[in-house]
């Protein structure tokens, strides 16, 4: 393994850890001001910080580059809004596992009718273990739905991020996308705060913005430039397990043996799906 590859692996793993810790640490702020307002604050601070650091020159890019960046901004806004609403209703590890169906859906699209469709099917089985027993649903139905919508956004985020990483210099594309995400989430956030701007929300989301989304998105975009997609995908398949661990350590969220088994199935399906693409 080269030094560049080792650095990229470290970036990807650090990104996953920071994302899950950021989600866990956001719970007190979301309880005080709401998940939508908290998401808006984080996206706004992330956009401000990255624009000040990167100073993207929009004039050097054409419509063919800017439109995908704006599309990524819409995706980031919707993905994060749905995710943070979901984790107020469903344990963090379960939300991440359900959300992981999005990236697996992207993989399944390329599998066509091959035997590799067994991997997404295995992940769906794992998600059913997470959310259903003989007595019925064991998770909040609305939270489950928000997690599915966040997963769709995650799949779109992967596709768009890879394209933008190649089209833009440095982190210019990400900076433009975060500005768009902050603007799109603004009316939803203001509505939740009653069209006020609480001082506590401003202060608390500044620190949270560095944990998520600023640092993880930047690390992921830089890692994707150095790693094969297959390697990156296998690393990302560990994220449901990290989400469950963060939920347990930070939030004391307990999972049943059946739910832990479901997370294992999702992780195994993700790693298998990505590894099989190299055959």
Image (spheres, rainbow, N blue to C red):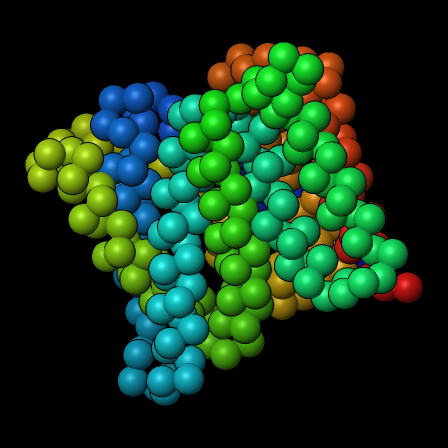
Q: Position of residue 142 (x, y in %)?
A: 43, 30
Q: Residue at x 37, y 76 (%)?
A: 67
Image position of 212 with respect to 175: above or below: above
Based on the displayed image, in which of its 4 quarters is residue 173 positioned? bottom left
Q: What is the count of numbered marks?
A: 0
Based on the displayed image, in which of its 4 quarters is residue 97 positioned? top right
Q: Residue at x 85, y 62 (%)?
A: 114
Image position of 168 with respect to 93: above or below: below
Image position of 149 with respect to 264: above or below: below
As drawn, the residue found furthest toward the front would be 135
Q: Quadrant of the C terminus?
A: bottom right
- Camera-side residue: 166 or 8? 166
Q: Is residue 234 left or right of residue 240?
A: right
As drawn, the residue found furthest toward the right would be 279
Residue 193 visible from this viewpoint = yes
Q: Position of residue 263 (x, y in %)?
A: 70, 30
- Camera-side residue: 69 or 125? 125
Q: Position of residue 145 (x, y in %)?
A: 48, 37
Q: Position of residue 224 (x, y in %)?
A: 63, 63
Q: Is residue 85 left or right of residue 5?
A: left
Q: Residue at x 36, y 68 (%)?
A: 70
Based on the displayed image, in which of its 4 quarters is residue 48 positioned? bottom left
Q: Quadrant of the N terminus?
A: bottom right
Q: Residue at x 57, y 65 (%)?
A: 159
Residue 169 visible from this viewpoint = no
């Amino acid at each position: 393994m080269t030094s560049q590859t080792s650095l990229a692996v470290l970036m990807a793993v650090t990104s996953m850890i920071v994302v899950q810790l950021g989600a866990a640490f956001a719970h007190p702020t979301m309880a005080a001001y709401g998940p939508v307002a908290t998401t808006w604050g984080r996206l706004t601070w992330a956009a401000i910080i990255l624009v000040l650091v990167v100073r993207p020159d929009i004039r050097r890019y054409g419509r063919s580059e800017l439109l995908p960046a704006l599309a990524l901004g819409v995706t980031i806004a919707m993905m994060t809004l749905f995710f943070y609403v979901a984790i107020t209703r469903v344990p963090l590890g379960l939300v991440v596992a359900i959300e992981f169906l999005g990236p697996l859906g992207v993989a399944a699209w390329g599998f066509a009718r091959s035997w590799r469709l067994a991997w997404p099917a295995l992940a769906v089985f794992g998600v059913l273990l997470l959310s259903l027993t003989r007595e019925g649903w064991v998770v909040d139905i609305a939270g489950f739905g928000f997690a599915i919508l966040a997963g769709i956004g995650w799949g779109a985020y992967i596709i768009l991020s890879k394209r933008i990483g190649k089209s833009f210099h440095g982190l210019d594309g990400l900076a433009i996308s975060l500005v768009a995400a902050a603007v799109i989430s603004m009316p939803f956030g203001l509505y939740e705060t009653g069209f006020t701007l609480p001082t506590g929300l401003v202060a608390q989301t500044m620190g949270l913005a560095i944990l998520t989304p600023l640092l993880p998105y930047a690390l992921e975009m830089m890692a994707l430039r150095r790693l094969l997609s297959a390697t990156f995908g296998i690393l990302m398949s560990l994220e449901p397990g990290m989400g469950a661990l963060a939920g347990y350590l930070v939030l004391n969220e307990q999972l049943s043996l059946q739910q832990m088994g479901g997370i294992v199935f999702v992780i195994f399906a993700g790693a298998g799906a990505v590894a099989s693409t190299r055959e």
